[in-house]
Image (tube, coloured by chain):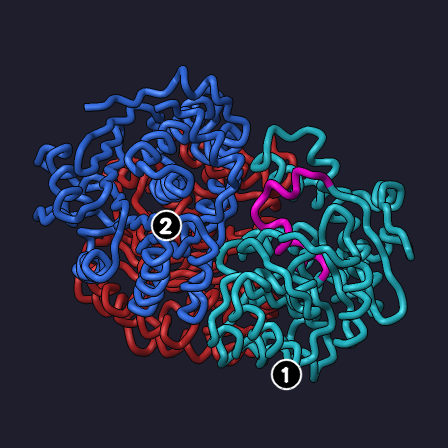
Chain colours: A cyan, B red, C blue
């Protein structure tokens, strides 16, 4: 897989990426899609989500600040996306922090088809049925082998599973990718996880193999982060630089710097 | 019209600009009002919107992440603003993307008086009755003569109409202004359209001729954008510089650099 | 009180600070908690707020964009926090601007225990029963002696009261602190007041004397602001620098630069 080819496709096709996301990082989710050259749209009214999903090329759901009504709108949007055949990503943000989050994630996973399940280690472990605790929205400790957890969840949910962390794990029913790019500074910025979901959604909008799309998207995102971290004065400055590094990301550089490993 | 005179008035009077806007760009809308020296307030509870509009000098509505309840609150706020005689601006964000947005815009236009209707080319064309599609919240193609569309809508809705784009078009029932300032970088930043609405609202708060207020506000905003673009490293850095350029905007510079054309 | 000791505790304990805050500054509230080294979480669904408060070490409430439902969720979260014995802070954002805000603040103060009441001069004066007007969310004029107002409110509500301004006033039932740090640039940035509340909440999460926690937190925040202001090109650049200054804040520097006065 040549990462630059997928980056090129995003920039040429400028896909619409429909989000129902949280109120904390909603702006940054839109931004990251935009600096990649795609077109973000956020819409959550029950009356229009199905229509909006219909004009989009991918749907990104994030339960960061969920309510019951909001999850109902997610279901309508996802059903519409399922019918159209565009990929649906669910960021299980905060799963394992409260029972409500676990219940709503499972409702979504049971009632619509989620093509990509994304979270940090303890969130994904929780969704896979492990007895772990998420510290609010920050990852808690997980004892289990994470690749095994991702593989298991991918099989039981017939989905691509993404665990973000120092080393990202991407598993579908056949294969596993690791992405070893990124910088520690990403953990100091609110919203890098949510943005990762938006990036994966953006790449999934233009490439059918969703595990490849996720790996390519994360590699681009994290190579830009590496570039930004070199010059940054702290997390806030870093975020600005990261957006601008994505905007100017060079295909050749990404192909050189990407550390995607197929297991 | 001397643009600097209106800028001066904003800075001296520090008008309260009440917003019911979308959850994506709400912070930037507040920021842009603030760096112009005015006082933004965001409030959307049905129980208080009329009271908040009463202490404000302009009301800015934006349907970017609308729900039915939210539009009902907009109506209450707008009725209060209409009664007080302060200008009401509606940003028809995403009109033409879903039927729900079109219906809700028309409801607002029918049930309260909107003094300024603002959008991009395909949004305004849609509200004017054209059969066009908006790409989420990004402008779609419009074949028709845009000045004609703006004029037509201004007459039928007895409003000032603003179409933002490379060349902004401002039409009321008597006249047309074009604003030819700005920089291509503005199109790379999420929220420049929403912020334009807040800027127009801020200037409309201090000047009775709303077309003049819109032209002056956009000229100031876009001259600052031109200054910011010169030094910027990318869209995120550009936005920071644009806010700071607005904050320090010099009246003389604006008068020199503004490219407002009366048609 | 050694300010650096409390800063150290925040960084070591990394407390979870649960917020129900407004949609304007929600991202910045999360950011400021994060750059101090703590763990922000935002959650407002009635079904989960009690559970989320239970895993947190402090609860921050902010009525900036309140609705009735949202205030009900605040009550549930606060009851849970009260039961657990963690501090609850209420930012009475916009009190004195509309009757609805006054009513809802008083409902909260009557129905749950608020440990820290925080606002600007006219907001706190209003909550203390004075007949003053808040200009949207910007402070209006208050004729009364502010220290007296803070003391009175602290006594009647058995709470720690914080009035932010050029000189911050912190009063509990026994003592008064003044914090004389900060920079005028803070008044040019949307959200510095909301962030102050998050900072106080973060320090209250690790220190039982809430007035001391508030004073220490504000001193740290404002010393960082002083550092940021020295190099900044305007309010937007200032905010970025302030976050990064907080992230790198040196304990010794804070102890040297802090201007906390005990009255």
Label 1 crowd (10 A; few <14 / some 14-19 / many >=20): few
In magenta segment, residue B228: no
Q: Quadrant of the N terminus of chain A?
A: bottom right
Q: In the displayed structure, does residue C58 sit left or right of residue B233?
A: left
Q: Is residue A198 magenta?
A: yes
Which residue is tagged 1?
Answer: A111
Local secondary structure at mark 1: helix
Q: Position of residue B96 (x, y in %)?
A: 54, 74
Q: Quadrant of residue B110?
A: bottom left
Residue A134 spot, x, y in % from top left: 59, 57
Image-based side of C84 in relation to A215, left or right? left
Residue A67 % position (x, y): 47, 71
Residue, x 10% and y 49% (percent of image)? C129
Residue drawn at x 52%, y 65% is A98
Q: Which residues are magenta?
A: A183-200
Q: Pointer 2: what residue?
A: C86
- Quick one: quadrant of the C terminus of chain A? bottom right
Please rate how many residues cluster around mark 2, counting C-alpha atoms within 10 Å: few if below 14, some from 14 to 19, many from 20.
many
**Quarter-wise, where is residue C263 in the image?**
top left
């Amino acid at each position: 897989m040549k990462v630059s080819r997928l980056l090129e496709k995003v920039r040429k096709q400028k896909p619409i990426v429909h989000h129902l996301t949280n109120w904390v990082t909603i702006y940054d989710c839109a931004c990251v899609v935009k600096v990649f050259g795609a077109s973000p749209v956020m819409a959550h009214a029950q009356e229009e989500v199905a229509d909006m999903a219909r004009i989009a090329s991918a749907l990104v759901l994030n339960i960061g600040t969920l309510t019951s009504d909001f999850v109902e709108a997610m279901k309508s949007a996802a059903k519409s996306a399922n019918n159209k055949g565009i990929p649906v990503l669910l960021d299980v943000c905060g799963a394992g922090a409260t029972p409500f989050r676990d219940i709503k994630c499972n409702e979504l996973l049971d009632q619509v088809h989620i093509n990509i399940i994304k979270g940090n280690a303890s969130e994904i472990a929780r969704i896979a049925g492990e007895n772990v605790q998420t510290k609010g929205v920050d990852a808690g400790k997980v004892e289990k082998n994470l690749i095994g957890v991702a593989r298991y969840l991918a099989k039981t949910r017939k989905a691509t599973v993404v665990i973000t962390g120092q080393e990202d794990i991407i598993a579908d029913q056949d294969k596993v990718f690791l992405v070893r790019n990124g910088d520690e500074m990403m953990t100091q910025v609110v919203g890098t996880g949510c943005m990762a979901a938006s990036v994966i959604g953006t790449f999934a909008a233009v490439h059918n193999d969703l595990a490849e799309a996720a790996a390519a998207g994360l590699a681009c995102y994290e190579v830009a982060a590496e570039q930004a971290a070199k010059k940054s004065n702290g997390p806030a400055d870093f975020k600005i630089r990261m957006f601008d590094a994505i905007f100017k990301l060079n295909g050749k550089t990404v192909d050189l710097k990407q550390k995607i490993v197929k297991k």
